[in-house]
Image (cartoon, rainbow, N blue to C red):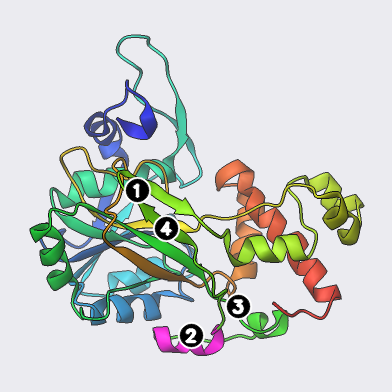
């Protein structure tokens, strides 16, 4: 059942919204090592993203293009291993879930969140796939260089769900973040944004979701620079006073579930966690390049469209953070 709602089965969800999706380019071939992703105006990341996952043996990319305007669709359509889904609906549109057949209760969700389960269920069938945003780069265990070999080991061990720590990468200063680059590889990104908080983010637990040990670099920066969850306080109260008074500090997701074997009740339950607990035997790492030269563009769109969770509230926190960073030397 989707997001814990006993009235909404995932196959019903996929059937209800399948007509909302159109395959605009390519032919989806189930069984190929596949990455699927939702993108909008991601030309900053896509060359590096495609090159990196191809180097891991990914042979097919399935993108939902959220009405990009920067040439993303055209660029992907030139790639022989890319398939593109489109819709008249936008990622941030509210849609009704199928009604509970018993109570008749109707719930609403953002279309983009539903897509993360609908796309693999409808197009990829029963098998492993990787879900990654354009700014996320999954690191395989050291002894693996090919995702097919890794998937085979997971299958032999009957592991269907694998979690990852979402490790935020950042530059030395705000000025470095804003410096324009054109990354073509993961190495280009690491050279420009080489830093991360050297802390354990997650620990695995038997038959449960990972336990959060540290809330990540964004949380540290928000706390350090006096950014709290109340926007009116951020606007009117000095940062030093916010720190002293101990207002709640916002945080971002530190867990991702990038690898699932779809089918048999396994699916993404929301944006970051699966319907079943992940394996307690393996924890991967995803490098998350949030603090890049592309972030201001993404913030401008998020704050205008309010397409993300809570009316894109996390980007309001970043807007406040960067204003305070800029007035305080700019060091991350």
Q: Identify the residue at horizontal 45%, vertical 59% (top origin).
A: 202
Quarter of the picture containing the N terminus is top left
Residue at numbered disc 1:
116
Foreground pick, 284 / 71: 284
- Residue 331 sits in quarter: bottom right
Mark sitting earlier along the chain (4/2): 2
Horizontally, residue 58 falls left or right of residue 76, namely left
Disc 2/disc 1 C-alpha distance (Å): 27 Å
Mark sitting earlier along the chain (2/1): 1
Q: Which mark is residue 190?
A: 2
Vertically, is 187 above or below 289?
Answer: below
Residue at numbered disc 3:
293
User: Of tags 3 and 4, which is closer to the observer?
Assistant: 4
Q: Residue furthest top?
A: 103
- Secondary structure mostly seen in the magenta stretch: helix
User: Of tags 2 and 1, which is closer to the observer?
Assistant: 2
Q: Secondary structure beneath disc 1?
A: helix
């Amino acid at each position: 059942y989707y997001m814990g709602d006993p009235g909404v089965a995932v196959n019903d969800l996929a059937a209800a919204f399948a007509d909302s999706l159109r395959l605009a380019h390519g032919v989806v071939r189930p069984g190929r090592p596949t990455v699927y992703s939702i993108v909008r105006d991601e030309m900053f990341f896509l060359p590096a993203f495609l090159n990196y996952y191809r180097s891991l043996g990914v042979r097919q990319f399935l993108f939902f293009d959220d009405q990009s305007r920067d040439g993303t669709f055209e660029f992907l359509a030139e790639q022989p291993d890319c398939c593109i889904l489109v819709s008249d609906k936008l990622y941030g549109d509210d849609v009704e879930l199928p009604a509970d057949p018993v109570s008749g209760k109707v719930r609403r969700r953002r279309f983009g969140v539903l897509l993360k389960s609908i796309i693999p269920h409808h197009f990829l069938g029963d098998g492993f796939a990787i879900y990654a945003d354009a700014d996320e780069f999954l690191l395989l265990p050291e002894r693996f260089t090919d995702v097919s070999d890794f998937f085979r080991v997971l299958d032999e061990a009957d592991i269907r769900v694998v979690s990852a720590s979402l490790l935020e990468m950042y530059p030395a200063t705000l000025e470095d973040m804003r410096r324009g680059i054109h990354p073509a590889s993961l190495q280009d990104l690491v050279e420009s944004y080489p830093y991360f908080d050297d802390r354990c983010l997650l620990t695995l637990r038997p038959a449960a979701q990972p336990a959060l040990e540290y809330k990540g670099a964004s949380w540290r920066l928000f706390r350090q620079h006096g950014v709290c969850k109340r926007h009116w306080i951020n606007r009117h109260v000095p940062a030093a006073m916010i720190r002293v008074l101990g207002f709640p500090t916002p945080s971002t997701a530190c867990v991702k579930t990038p690898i699932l074997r779809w089918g048999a009740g396994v699916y993404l339950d929301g944006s970051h966690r699966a319907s079943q607990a992940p394996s307690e035997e393996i924890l991967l790492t995803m490098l998350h390049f949030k603090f890049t030269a592309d972030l201001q563009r993404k913030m401008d769109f998020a704050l205008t469209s309010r397409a993300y969770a809570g009316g894109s509230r996390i980007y309001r926190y970043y807007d406040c953070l960067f204003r305070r960073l800029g007035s305080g030397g700019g060091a991350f």
